[in-house]
Amino acid sequence: MALSNRQLQLARRPSGLPSLQDFTLTSHSLNSTLAAGQVLVKVRYLSIDPAMRVWISGVKTYFNPVNPGDLMPSLGLGEVLQSASDKLQPGDLVRGMLGWQDYAVCQASDLQRLPKDNNPSQHLGVLGINGLSAYIGLVTIAKIKEGETVLISTAAGAVGSVAVQIAKVKGCRVVGIAGSDEKCAWVCRDLGADACFNYKTVTSIRQAIRTHCPAGLDVYFDNVGGETLSAALQQMNQSGRIAMCGSIESYNQEAPKPWTNYSTLILKNVMVQGFIVMNYAQEFSGALTQLRTWLQAGKIKHREELLEGLENCPRGLRMLFTGENKGKVIVRLEPTARL
Amino acid sequence: MALSNRQLQLARRPSGLPSLQDFTLTSHSLNSTLAAGQVLVKVRYLSIDPAMRVWISGVKTYFNPVNPGDLMPSLGLGEVLQSASDKLQPGDLVRGMLGWQDYAVCQASDLQRLPKDNNPSQHLGVLGINGLSAYIGLVTIAKIKEGETVLISTAAGAVGSVAVQIAKVKGCRVVGIAGSDEKCAWVCRDLGADACFNYKTVTSIRQAIRTHCPAGLDVYFDNVGGETLSAALQQMNQSGRIAMCGSIESYNQEAPKPWTNYSTLILKNVMVQGFIVMNYAQEFSGALTQLRTWLQAGKIKHREELLEGLENCPRGLRMLFTGENKGKVIVRLEPTARL
């Protein structure tokens, strides 16, 4: 049986902020005859991540660059419709690189089967890469301790919003940085941060950090790089730690702001660990067990910004850089009748 | 009994490269009547270190800034002449912050008694702060492993020359960077590096690193910062480590070269640890035991550039930045008859 499959393909490399015109919606007929080991998946939820901006920039990362004409790769959740593998059955909920499309034909071995629960999209957020990034950055890498002061940039974002909550569970004093007063209020009220400031309206990021962290910083969870990174280092206590998870400030720029005061790393005996969470796979099982326990106990919450419909994926990506979202940006695709 | 004590005091803050005119030689009469717990020390060897340039710049570090009119502080070795402490006896060899002067009156508790051997100045080099910095940077922090490629800047300097030798003992492939062809030849022939290049004559530091480290870098022992740091990071393998011991490139500059490609830390999962060796005091005993064993077995050597006479201290400091020295710069002061 042939299915009609819509795909969003990269049309051109964005210059600066990604726009809707950088992607093309195409449609083709998908023959669902599967090779051995393959499954046909109906895509249900797509994870929209800042790293996508890097994938489409032409830079070689842990992925090959995405070129114009290619299907936009994307982590997602879906339901198995047909299976030619004994690993997965029709009806299974799976997570994997499904792409911006209605249906995906994948190797069963490339997918993870997930438990079915009432809130599947949390497997793309707090129980997915974002929750793992927050946990591994703070716990495995920065080794946060009770009573320490932890600064978290993009505190209202997908990773930051989980990081704020984890640091609170661990008994830290938590200060967030976000891009609007409304987000800051949300980070304090909803996520429990002790303070949060709007980097767009303060006169000096460094002064704002000093004001909100009078005892200095022990840990900085960095999602942005640039000026904020320099300012945070300046306020760092001896033997501070920086978990460098992202440098979103630079993703849309040809020449990102350089790091001017890095020699302070020496005077303050500071450790910086840049990380791609996939390199810490041996920690995932323990981290997920811990995250699930906190989630069930109501100590942390999954927070998402839900968009409806495949055609809204580019808008979701753009939102990450215009700062419209609170929590994880997820696109939900309409279900279809079982085959 | 009154002794005539010469001192070198800071005359003014240097602008750029320190010069002989930045210091004044004074002489005063020292009354050797000691308070309880004090000792009078005849200074014999003074350790000349790049960090001194930072101390006199007015920046607050782990020390208070040295101000014009102050005695220039300096690590040194001396012989106890008189003691009002039961911890030390006349004739003991001691190490401590003695200063650029002929005689020092110190608290016995601020000094370390050293074993007497035929080569006392090695306690300011391979068995002192420099050897400890090299050991702690490579072993404790960067955790070098057999077969890894290790890049070491200022490879002919006090710390670098020990670092090259330690990395070789540990079975690494070692590539040095130094500032003259003669030094490079010395680093390979005398210290055992597999390769060493002259950063002043290569057309591109990055290309030189690529040429000499065809399998990429696993560890970079950074003594310079700036352009070399960016170039090293670019050639780093996944999960590489940077032990950031110094940033000598910036010490004489108002605006040091910024770090432009730090977001590569994320893509390559690289760790940077800035360090002041004094923060690793709990490691000193084990490190010194290991260094002494290697020294006695002839696996590493103490290398020094010896100057004679107190008045040559400023010249020694300047040499560190003009790159005239090979190994540790030490100033030897004439002995005096026992009191």
Image: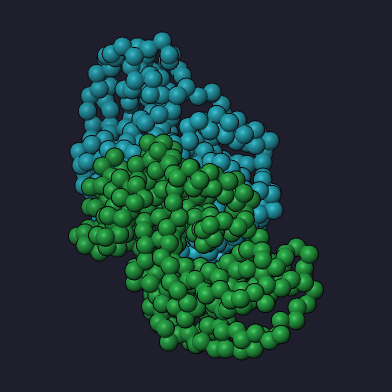
Chain colours: A green, B cyan
Horizontal side of B250 relative to A81 (left or right) equals left
Answer yes or no: is residue A95 visible: yes
Question: Which quadrant of the structure image shows residue A116?
Answer: bottom right
Question: Which quadrant of the structure image shows residue B308?
Answer: top left
Q: Residue at x 32, y 26 (%)?
A: B104
When the figure is inspected, residue A146 is found, relative to residue B12, above or below; the finding is above
Residue B252 image offset from top left, x and y in percent: 32, 56
Answer yes or no: is residue A266 visible: no
- Of the pair B104 and A156, the residue shown nearer to us: A156
Q: Quadrant of the C terminus of chain B?
A: top left
The number of numbered discs placed on residues in the rendered structure image is 0
Horizontal side of A253 relative to B23 (left or right) equals right
Residue A162 image offset from top left, x and y in percent: 44, 53
- Of the pair A251 and B339, the residue shown nearer to us: A251
Horizontal side of A25 relative to A286 (left or right) equals left
Residue B118 image offset from top left, x and y in percent: 56, 29
Residue B99 image offset from top left, x and y in percent: 33, 33
Q: Residue furthest front?
A: A337
- Of the pair A80 and B171, the residue shown nearer to us: A80
Q: Residue at x 37, y 12 (%)?
A: B85
Q: Residue at x 62, y 49 (%)?
A: A285
Horizontal side of A210 relative to B256 (left or right) equals left
Q: Residue at x 23, y 47 (%)?
A: A211
Q: Quadrant of the N terminus of chain B?
A: top left
When the figure is inspected, residue B67 is found, relative to residue B231, above or below; the finding is above
When the figure is inspected, residue A327 is found, relative to residue B276, above or below; the finding is below
